[in-house]
Amino acid sequence: MITARDIMTKEVLTVSPETDVNKAARLLLDNFMNGMPVVDEQGNLVGIICQSDLIAQQKKLPIPSVFTLLDGFIPLVSRKNFENELKKIVASTVAEAMTPNPITVGPESSIEEIARLMVDKKLHTLPVMDEGKLIGVVGKEDILRTLLPCDENSQDTQE
């Protein structure tokens, strides 16, 4: 059985909550990553910042839909969702744009469990935690590599 430990990236690039969103975007692009963990000063995982979090800044602010009933306005969207969207659009630091409390997996999580989480929750990057410590990340690319025959995997490293 293939586990997270077998396919994870062990040398994890992280950012702090105070990192500027432009710097985070540059790190993601330069390192060909979709997402990276956000850790505090003590090294605790506090969130994950993904390309989609940063792309959200390019959206126009949606005006919440409302309808009137007896001269009162009733919103058709959650105020909390609207506020979260607004925060991401105007974010200047990773803390303002990141997804807090990310879903994580353990080192012994099976590739099937990881794939299910990624598909069901629409995730691209999962931090791998062991006894409360960040030990790696698994991305969709890591799972795709397992689909290639062994000779193709080794051929990529020889080129």
Image (tube, rainbow, N blue to C red):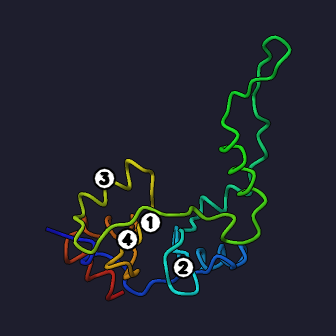
Tell me, yes or no, whether the two marked residues, 1 and 3, touch with CB atoms within 8 Å: no
Tell me, yes or no, whether the two marked residues, 1 and 4, touch with CB atoms within 8 Å: yes
Q: Secondary structure at mark 1?
A: strand
Q: Nearer the viewer, residue 40 or 62?
A: 40
N-terminal label among 4 and 3: 3
Q: Position of residue 78 (x, y in %)?
A: 66, 37
What amino acid is at disc 4?
Val
What amino acid is at disc 2?
Val
How far is mark 3 from mark 2, CA to CA?
25 Å
Quadrant of the image occupied by residue 76:
top right
What amino acid is at disc 3?
Arg
* Number of the label disc, if any, that sits on residue 138: 4
Q: Residue at x 52, y 67 (%)?
A: 34
Q: Residues within 10 Å of mark 2 (few under 14, many from 20)?
A: some
Tell me, yes or no, whether the two marked residues, 2 and 1, touch with CB atoms within 8 Å: no
Tell me, yes or no, whether the two marked residues, 3 and 2, touch with CB atoms within 8 Å: no
N-terminal label among 3 and 2: 2
How far is mark 2 from mark 1, CA to CA?
15 Å
